[in-house]
Image: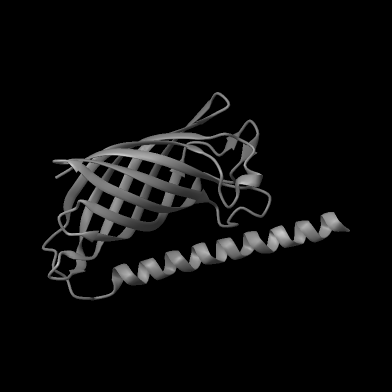
Amino acid sequence: MCDEICFCAREKYDTMVHIKLRLGMVALGLFLLAPWPSQAEEIRLNSIGIRGGVSGSSPIGEKEAEYFHQYDLMANWSMPWGWYSESGWGVGTRLMGSLGAVTTSGDTAFISTVVPGVVFEKKDGWLSLEVGGGAALLSQHRFPNQDIGGLFQFVWDTAVRARVYRGIGVGYWFHHMSDAHLYGSNVHGFDLHMIEVSYRF
């Protein structure tokens, strides 16, 4: 009886997490499409870099049967929508793309992501908080101890990034990837804690 109650509670929690993820992605899409005031002139390459990280404590950590590593090359473009105050603080928009690999238990899958997002920052770029939701494609979805459901996955990223010396920057990313129940309730994604080193133009 106790196991059934715990299972039902866990399923309810998972459903709420995925509903919030979907609503967040819809809200982000509407935000990016809205015709609001802009001070950016054009789409431009903002930064390039490398990221690497491992899975760990996370909202779905109890269901992760594998210990994942991910490494990728990333590029960030500034999009032509944003608003900044006279002090330089404001909100902008970004498009992030990456190519890399996910490894676990001797298996390697190639991964690519496209993640539009918003950034809360000082316009000179020395400190920013970035939030985005998008999609990932993998070369495989079955690993020795975990099946993530399919080659297409949803992605949610939250990052704190800082410029430390001239164009060189560092950052921390919380990287969530799951199918949002696209392939059923018996497959699960994973969360990663990633460190970035980048060059900003």
Scheme of colours in the image = one colour
Q: Quadrant of the C terminus?
A: top left
Question: In the current view of this chain or complex, which residue is farthest to the right?
Answer: 1
Q: Residue at x 62, y 40 (%)?
A: 147
Instruction: Name the residue nearer the viewer: 124 or 102.
Output: 124
Residue 138 x, y percent position in the rendering: 47, 40
- The total number of labels drawn is 0
Residue 172 x, y percent position in the rendering: 37, 45
Instruction: Tell me if residue 44 comes above or below residue 171 in the rendering.
Output: below
Q: Residue at x 32, y 56 (%)?
A: 129
Q: Is 178 displayed left or right of 118 in the figure?
A: right
Q: Is 185 displayed left or right of 87 in the figure?
A: right
Q: Is 11 displayed left or right of 101 in the figure?
A: right
Q: Residue at x 56, y 66 (%)?
A: 19
Instruction: Tell me if residue 27 comes above or below residue 190 in the rendering.
Output: below
Q: Quadrant of residue 181?
A: bottom right
Q: Residue at x 44, y 48 (%)?
A: 174
Q: Is 46 displayed left or right of 50 in the figure?
A: left
Residue 29 x, y percent position in the rendering: 37, 67
Q: Quadrant of residue 1?
A: bottom right
Residue 155 x, y percent position in the rendering: 45, 52
